[in-house]
Image (cartoon, coloured by chain):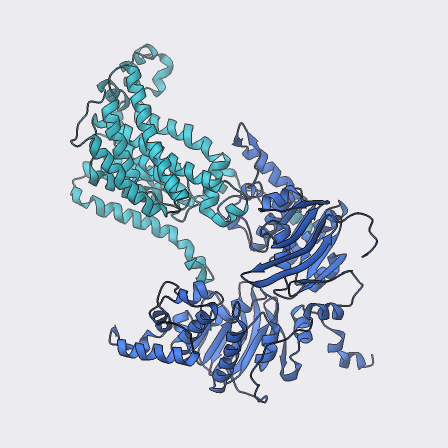
Amino acid sequence: MLDGRAARPFAELSGVSKYFSGARALEGVDFSCHEGSIHAILGENGAGKSTLIKIMAGVVQPDSGTLSVEGIQHRFSRPSEAAKAGIVCVFQELSLLPDLSVADNISISDPPRRFGLIDRRAQRERAEALLARIHCEDVDPRALIRDLSLSRRQMVEIAKALGKNPKLLILDEATSALTSRDVETVYNVLAELKAEGTGMLFISHRMHEVEALCDTLSVFRNGRHIETFLKGARTQDEIVKLMIGRDIVHQFPVKPPALSRKPHLAVTDLKWENRLNGVSLSVGKGEIVGLGGLDGQGQKELLLALFGVLRGVEGKVTVGGEGGIPASPADAKGGRSRIALVPEDRKTEGLMLPMSIADNLLVASFDKVRQGPFIDPTKSRQAVADAIAQLQIKLNKPEDPVASLSGGNQQKVVIAKWLLTQPEVMLLNDPTRGIDVGTKQELYRLMRELADKDTAILFYSTDYAELIGCCDRVAVMYDGRIVTEFSGDAITEEALVAAALNITRPTDVPAREAVPA
Amino acid sequence: MSAITASTPPRASALAMSIRQNRGFYGAILLLAALYLVYNFIHPRGFSTNVFIANTNESVALAFVAMAQAMTVIVGGLDLSVGAVMTLTSCIASELVRGEPWQIILGCVVSVAAGAGFGLVNGLVIVYGRLQPIIATLATGAVAIGLALLIRPQPGGEVDLDLNWAVTNSIKDLAETYHLFEDGEAAWLQPIAWVPVPLLILVTITAAVWMPFRRTVTGRTLYAIGSSEGAAYMSGLPINRAKLWAFTLAGFFAGCAGLYLAIQTGSGNADIPQAGAYTLNSIAAVVLGGISLLGGVGTVIGALIGALILRAISFYFRILSIDPLLQPLVEGVVLLAAVSLGAIRTLRVKNRLELFR
């Protein structure tokens, strides 16, 4: 139906659904891919791309539906079974063992053996051959993984995958960690593999890569397979529309009229490693500024840098006209700057799960409830009661472990903990992830209330609807930089998605086209 | 640029590479060499084979216990029962290693097998009971001491005296005792006749057990587990089997330590403080030998070197008139210095959150 290809698909999914603790990840997906083709999977964050490839690679099992490879139905319970059937995945999270050598890692699941013992020489030669195939002769097979750069590690990961002789190679954001030189190499390798008849599934957030490499594109949205088409059959604008769909249901508090505000938090040319490449941004008092863009474009690093977690940050940061880059979280929250960060992972960075709700609430502001060296029980009881009332945290007793609360209430505890420090700048790292809709709406209202009380809020979210509904301005990041800022009515899904993919849409530049040459 | 970088750049030599990747291990070797060289230099009688033999004799038990500890630390665990298992096997050996030659050999085999068996039990408890190694082995260690006390309520035993003489002296003495190689006068034997038997035992067992094991898939899996257990699992490696092997081999090495201790002292003694001291020293030795307590880095040979360093420090107290009471203090300072050198790496971490992971 697609292009009249006579060959039957190499791998075929029909009616596949997968739920994670009740939340839909994939629903009724029919999908197929062919050998000798580079097939792009496109979709927003949370569209179901990762779940799709995890099912094909044997990492997770579908709740319903079937997966056939070369016409034979399979149910993979682990990645090695998928590899036997010819499906090998290069994962986004690296699966390499940092303390072992490159050669060890490439042959980790089935090393060459002599008399039952691992044949190191054969293993090294195998690694050399595979590295040569991906034009990485400069990687020494004896080097330890932990001594390699992220980009080189990713290349080793690809060599390791090729060592399993895949008929279908899945590349999940495999190019996101690569330097431009390695990206070039990978392009060539993929083209060679395609010519040899290998099929590839290519997941990338970089539209120009997809355009350059792939021959077939599939769009996913909200766990559903929307459409598959050949390259060139649709314009970039149409692809963006397919990715967004039309189902915004959230309720957001009314935004105040746009004011021009004096910047309170001002960031100038912030750089760190190669993840932040010169970020400039300002947030005014009482303003909610959203950080948009696809995952991993430096948003998290920006928040961590502003909170003093990263070492070796360059650039200028001022809060209320003074100060510099905080040296530590303790420095960031105290002193004049009064910055708070609601971190990415509330279970490891936000909360001490076995400790009580009360202790968790107080943990950032002991200096406010102490009497000399001692923690004052009366003051702390009062502070805890206030915090619980302000955020309407639903609990039995404040002495219960915080782990006993639901996800939404846990997140409220994290936020309440920081509100007790009376911050002037709130940094929020995707605070509504994994939270029910009711609590989300409470958080949106709370953010607006805080802003009305003159707090400066910098809000990173992977959900575009939130950015549109909550923010006075949105800055979109791409590759460690802010590429565009939108404010007021200009914050639309089309604009955010296009900016996130770093596409310059023809509609964005009519003025320039109108100018006669 | 591509024309130049695409061709294979000159590779570091194997040794340079190995040194760069195992700084802790090579540092330990240098430290040991320096310590022992200076020791012999300032020794009142200079270097003599007698002193060398005596020194190696005193080092064997700790070396084996440290090697036992290394097995479990490499997988990211810790074994608090190694000293107790050594004590248990030494008590068993003190009962069994005597009589006819076949009885002696059987006694040795049973003693070491008992250690390995005890290690296997540790492994089973940890793998299938899903307990943390540190608490599981704290408990089984107490069990081992209890068993040792049952076997030997009082210190004693009559370990075969010929064997005692043969394994605590030079190769020549060994040959003489058992009338081998023309009573040790064979010409080919002479170049190595002076080598202490305890050293020979250490080297032989390391070469016969550890070196091949390290090159098996199971051995490689130990490192994979210690390095990143999640990635090891996702690579389809035999994790449970490898952990069972790690603890079984730990028991085996602890058994070797116990057997040697029994032969060396000619007796068995369920000495509780001694068992504890050996366990703690084994952890110190492992760290000194360049093994990461986080797992995945280091070798059993490193632990051997670490144990020898600890022993070498103690030898100094004998020839210098330093108060022996200062010995723990000096050992502590050396350990602290070694660990601090290893921690310099963390200064390079750019994301401080990673320090807590």
Front residue of A27 and B40: A27
Residue B122 locus on image (x, y percent): 35, 39
Quadrant the N terminus of chain A occupies: bottom right
Indicate the colour of chain A. blue
- Choose top left, top right, bottom left or bottom right for residue A508: bottom right
Q: Compared with residue B48, is residue A365 higher up or lower down, i.e. above or below?
A: below
Q: Compared with residue A513, is residue A120 higher up or lower down, i.e. above or below?
A: above
Question: What residue is drawn where x is 42% and y is 32%?
Answer: B210
Residue A70 locus on image (x, y percent): 72, 44
Quadrant the C terminus of chain A occupies: bottom right
- Taking the view exactly as shown, the residue that stands out farthest to the top is B182
Q: Compared with residue A467, is residue B118 higher up or lower down, i.e. above or below?
A: above
Front residue of B227 and B304: B227
Q: Compared with residue B198, is residue A357 higher up or lower down, i.e. above or below?
A: below
> In this view of the protein, can residue B313 be seen by the observer?
no
Residue A375 locus on image (x, y percent): 27, 74
Q: Which chain is cyan?
A: B
